[in-house]
Image (cartoon, grey):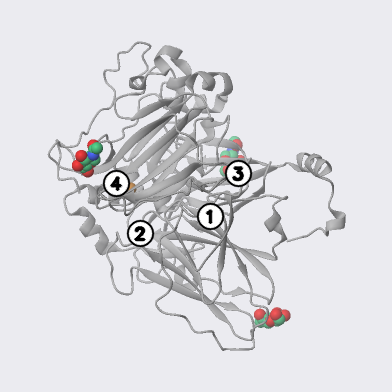
Amino acid sequence: MRLLSPSLLPSAAALALLMAAQAKHVYEYWDIGYLTTNRGIPNLESKKAIGVNNHFPLPVVRADKGDTLVLNVHNSLDVGTSLHAHGLFQRGTNYYDGVPMTTACPIAPGTNFTYYIPLDQAGTYWIHGHSKEQNFDGLRTPLIINEPEDPYNKIDEEFLFTVEDWWPITFEQSMDIIAAPHGLEYIFGKLPGALINGYDGALANPLAFQPGKTYRIRLINMASMPEAEFVIDDHDLQIIEVDGVSTKPKTVKVVRLAPGQRLSVLVKAKPSSNLNYNYHITIMGDYLPSVPGIFPITHTSPIIYNNKSTEFAPTAMPLASEPFDDINIESLEYLPALIADRSLFLNLTSGFTENEYSHRESINFKVYRDPIVPTMFTALTTPDSMAINPITYGPQTSAHVLKYDEVIEVLLWSPTERPHPIHLHGHVFQVIERGSVKDKTGEARKTVPQHIAGYSPLMRDTVMVDVGGYVVIRFKADNPGVWNLHCHFDWHMGQGMNMLFVEAPKQMKEILKVPEQIVEQCRRQGIPVEGNVVGRTTYNYDGAPDLPHLHPTSPFV
Ligand SMILES: *[C@@H]1O[C@H](CO)[C@@H](O)[C@H](O)[C@H]1NC(C)=O
Ligand SMILES: *[C@@H]1O[C@H](CO)[C@@H](O)[C@H](O)[C@H]1NC(C)=O
Ligand SMILES: *[C@@H]1O[C@H](CO)[C@@H](O)[C@H](O)[C@H]1NC(C)=O
Ligand SMILES: [Cu+2]
């Protein structure tokens, strides 16, 4: 990394001008296609995966804050595709959020589409498929947005680790299996391999440290199911970024990330050392069955201080392991706990369907189904009086209409045996409280210390709701658009744990200028772009997808 000495630093005003002048377009050309591979994991069967430019791992996208990402896609698949830049607000560009039937139509097979994504936030993000959870089959890669003015640019060097699970079956195959009774038990017989930076985790790269230097380590959990933990023997980790949000530095021994989450930590190298050390990345999750030697699995690789020495500091066993504490970490930017204008209760439940006894995940017992008209178009083309009525968007999109600038509190409630990493598009939210749904005494309740003047709760875009746990989040509806809230376990999302916030439809009409290529993709596939959930201009929504429903006496597990 190139550093300017303080005397050479331009004034803030000059710097702003300089940056504006330097804002550039970052071009990517991605041909999305099938590739049969086991990603080099020994003893794992190959499957039909989804790669870019006939290659794995995918290109890592790096840019500076203020740039525009021009992502030119050709779809070589025989099904639709789309890309979502996870964590970006897409302020004014809702139609590039990449959620088919919510914000646009899928990119049709054999066609091109170009995303123009303004990179207004610095930090650690990722880009992944949002059509039929194609990320499960490999369509996922880091998006690192550098902030030239970031004080942490004074660090000496930066490393990046991504974690993925790699299953020997495709998402489609796995969905068929897990819908059936005992499907999950069957599928856990086919446990995944672990990829670190796109390669077999057993081959994770050694790092070189020099005494006295400070390193920034970025971590991204791009997995479909497991969590990931990161530890370095006898070194502290100082958290400085969570999901793209700068935090007040917080020193810990271990960090844990759920699928969809990102972190940056600073690591200060020892003042001098003849010893070498190890770092450890564990792919884990107590909600997944344990199979000795396969899952959970820890991959260990050296941190070399002295390449002439073979001596290593001992590893303290068991490795440090603990849940991530979102309640006691503060955002750097001053924003005290928001005062909620209203509160929503989201029951994260699951059960079996009425007709086919097939397993589904739901929010308030609603299994998400795509509308006939992409929801953004419904919000833009129906009169204001209809656009503010949730039923306009169909019975099973679980649409909630938000008023411009109102503060929404959401109680994420997980009474089942499943945890859920819940991701909200278009926003970061404050994490206000955590607890247990069965807690009668308040013992398990952890809430942000609101009595501390100026306490700024952590803001992030993906939060882990534990088995039998709840989380309270708050955000301000200041980004007109249609935004998904969903579980980031691919299977749960695929089984229906998804819903929509239709945020400020009146302001959407003023702000969003839908590019012709978006409409073109819809026309090409015969997808209507006007009217309510089924394309009508009345309150008649007959024919809207409204199956399957959960069985009323279904065993909720
Ligand atoms: C279509 O996209 C591919 C992949 O990005 C690119 O190489 C090609 O030039 C594009 N074609 C057109 C006509 O834009
Ligand atoms: C060993 O370390 C020295 C000093 O840090 C460095 O100059 C050299 O390139 C390293 N050699 C190898 C093989 O990594
Ligand atoms: C939430 O869902 C569970 C089933 O998983 C159900 O037993 C419970 O009554 C629901 N809670 C509310 C308040 O609806
Ligand atoms: Cu889930």
Q: Residue furthest left?
A: 553
- Residue beneath the point at 55% across and 66% down: 237
Badge 1 is on which residue? 58
Callout 2 secondary element: loop
Discs 3/4, front: 3
| Quarter of the view holding residue 324 | bottom left
Q: Amino acid at mark 2?
A: Trp
Which one is nearer the viewer's eye here, 327 or 27?
327
**Residue annotated with mark 4:** 414
**What residue would you read off at disc 2?**
167
Mark 4 and mark 1: Cα distance apart in space: 34 Å
Reading the image, the residue beneath label 3 is 334
- Tell me the SS state at disc 1: loop
Give the CA distance from mark 2 to mark 4. Answer: 26 Å
- How far is mark 2 from mark 1, CA to CA? 17 Å
Question: Which of the numbered marks, if any, corresponds to residue 333?
Answer: none
Who comes first in sequence, dot 3 or dot 1? 1
For ligand 1, the image quadrant comes to: top right
Query: Callout 2: few (<14), some (14-19), or many (20+) C-alpha neighbours within 10 Å?
Result: many
Q: Tell me the kind of residue under disc 3.
A: Tyr
Check disc 3: other Cα within 10 Å, few if <14, some if 14-19, many if 20+: few
Is residue 162 shown above or below 77? below
Residue ID at (77%, 43%): 19
- In the displayed orientation, state which residue is furthest to the right: 7
Residue 500 is situated, as x and y percent measured from the top left of the image, at 39, 32
